[in-house]
Image (cartoon, rainbow, N blue to C red):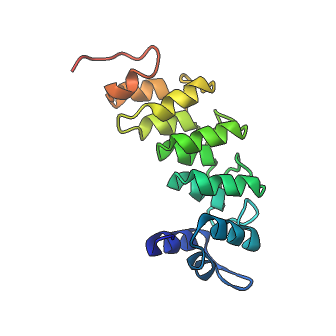
């Protein structure tokens, strides 16, 4: 079953009411994934159903690291490369969340690995910035062809970011970064 907090959070993020009841009441009745996925189909929560930030359910599934829900949404026609109002794609959210299974699913769906948000940040940039010392998502993005030298609007590439924030655990995953011994 979905926990009350998760249901409220999901309903809040999608916002508004839908025919047949509020998003929250529909989500609350959704316990098992199969039931939840039928609710997704019933209320049309794909890339056609966006909140005021331009985000769809596919963005929130990626941000939550929920690969099962993401797969249901993709099977129902959600756009895996849909950009929100700030240019964030589900891959940006998955990279920030350090969700390797979601990143793999999105890459398999054919998303653009170097999509840039309005600040020029790519999913790899988000993965480096939010890595907390983890390298799985960084490696997946690099293996998919992400450009570690692509600069954002502020002149920072994922490689220079890794050096600047002195996250040496991350720097070792990016070829050419200077690693300082501990």
Residue 49 position in % (x across, y down): 72, 66
Query: Residue 121, can we see it?
Result: no
Specify whether 163 is left or right of 138. left
Query: How many numbered discs sit on the rendered protein?
Result: 0
Residue depicted at 56% across the width and 72% down the height: 31
Query: Residue 133, can we see it?
Result: yes
Residue 84 position in % (x across, y down): 65, 54
Specify whether 57 is left or right of 66. right
Specify whether 182 is left or right of 87. left
Reply above or below: 144 against 50.
above
Q: Which of 20 and 89 is in front in this view?
A: 20
Q: Which residue lies furthest to the left in this view?
A: 182
Pick the quarter of the image with the C terminus: top left
Residue 159 position in % (x across, y down): 46, 24
Residue 137 position in % (x across, y down): 50, 35
Reply above or below: 9 against 163.
below
Instruction: State which quadrant residue 45 falls in.
Output: bottom right
Residue depicted at 60% across the width and 82% down the height: 25
Reply above or below: 83 against 35.
above
Residue depicted at 50% across the width and 44% down the height: 99
Instruction: State which quadrant residue 135 falls in.
Output: top left
Residue depicted at 56% across the width and 78% down the height: 28
């Amino acid at each position: 079953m979905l926990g009350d907090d998760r249901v409220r959070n999901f309903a809040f993020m999608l916002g508004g009411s839908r025919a047949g009841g509020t998003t929250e009441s529909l989500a609350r009745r959704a316990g098992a994934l199969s039931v939840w996925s039928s609710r997704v189909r019933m209320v049309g929560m794909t890339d056609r159903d966006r909140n005021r930030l331009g985000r769809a359910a596919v963005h929130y599934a990626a941000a939550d690291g929920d690969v099962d829900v993401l797969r249901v949404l993709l099977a129902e026609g959600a756009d895996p490369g849909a950009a929100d109002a700030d240019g964030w794609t589900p891959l940006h959210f998955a990279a920030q969340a350090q969700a390797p299974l979601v990143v793999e699913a999105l890459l398999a769906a054919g998303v653009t690995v170097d999509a840039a948000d309005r600040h020029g940040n790519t999913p790899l940039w988000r993965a480096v910035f939010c890595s907390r010392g983890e390298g799985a998502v960084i490696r997946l993005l690099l293996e998919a062809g992400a450009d570690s030298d692509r600069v954002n609007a502020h002149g920072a590439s994922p490689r220079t970011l890794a050096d600047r924030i002195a996250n040496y655990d991350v720097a070792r995953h990016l070829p050419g970064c200077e690693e300082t011994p501990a």
